[in-house]
Every structure is written in structure tokens, then in C-alpha cells.
Image (cartoon, rainbow, N blue to C red):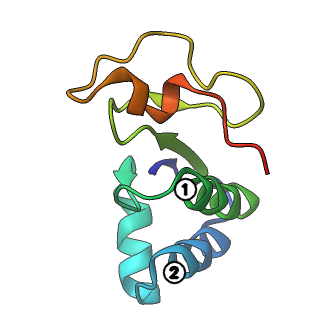
Amino acid sequence: MLLTEAGDRKMEAVRAIRTVTGLSLWNSKLLLDSTPVAVTGPDWLEVANEAARLLEDAGAHATVLCDWCDRPITRGAGLLDPAPCTGPWPAEACRASWPPAAD
């Protein structure tokens, strides 16, 4: 997940980064000040979406990227991105090319 902008509520965003990453407040602030920056590594789509939601609720702007092909994943229903996968792995495994799993 990529933190793209700090937003106006920086203290809330620092706390949200701390919640998502487990970093100290100081390191969370350093991370926030170095946007755009990857906040989490490859993770489950649901976990990345929840982390992005926490950051956005705190006023920051976050983008979830497909760990297969680095395309941005739009949260919502339907195909996440209709473009074909250009990653190094089989397109069938690309999470950005397939609808989210039904709960």
C-alpha cells in the first residue's frame, strides 16, 4: 500500500500509520513526511484495503497497489482494473484483474 499524501490532519495520520505498521510515533512521522512511500509490503488485499481505509479516515491519501503488477486497485465491486496484467506472473493470479472474493 502506498501513502500518496499526508493530508491536513497530520497528527491523526501519524497515529494511523503507527496503527498500521507498529512503528513508533517518531518513525511514523518520518514515514508520513517522506510521501509518496510504501507503508506496507505485499499483503492480502483485504488487509491492504483496511489499512488504506484507516489512513484515509485519518485524512491521509493512500493507494492500494497490486503486488503482482503494481497497478492501482480501486476499492469497490466489479473488476478492479479491466486492463490486462503485465506482471511477471500468470495473469490469472493478478488480483487487480479479478473481482474481489465474495464474503
Name the residue rendered at 45%, 51% in the picture: 1
Q: Which amino acid does label 2 sit on?
A: Arg
Tell me the quarter of the picture where residue 43 sits: bottom left
**Is label 2 in a helix, a strand or a loop?**
helix
Asked if 103 appears above or below 27 in the picture, the reply is above
Asked if 13 appears above or below 99 in the picture, the reply is below
On the image, the x and y values in percent for residue 40 come to: 40, 62
On the image, the x and y values in percent for residue 48 come to: 55, 56
Left or right of 79, for residue 95: left
Q: How many marks?
A: 2
Residue pushed farthest top? 83
Q: Distance between the residues labelled 1 and 2?
A: 15 Å
On the image, the x and y values in percent for residue 66 come to: 43, 37
**Is label 1 in a helix, a strand or a loop?**
helix
Asked if 4 appears above or below 9 in the picture, the reply is above
Q: Which one is nearer the viewer's eye here, 82 or 31?
A: 82
Name the residue rendered at 48%, 9% in the picture: 83
Task: Residue 18: give its label.
Answer: 2
Task: Residue 17: give its label.
Answer: none
Quick one: label 1 or label 2, which is nearer the N terminus?
2
Q: Which one is nearer the viewer's eye here, 40 or 24?
A: 40
**Crowd tier of the residue under label 2, counting other residues whose Cα lies within 10 Å: few below 14, some 14–19, many 20 or above:** some
The answer to the question of whether label 1 and label 2 lie on touching residues, with beta carbons closer than 8 A, is no
Q: Which of marks 1 and 2 is in front?
A: 1
Q: What residue type is labelled 1?
A: Ala
Name the residue rendered at 68%, 64% in the picture: 54
Task: Residue 48: give its label.
Answer: 1
Name the residue rendered at 61%, 26% in the picture: 80
On the image, the x and y values in percent for residue 101 come to: 68, 42
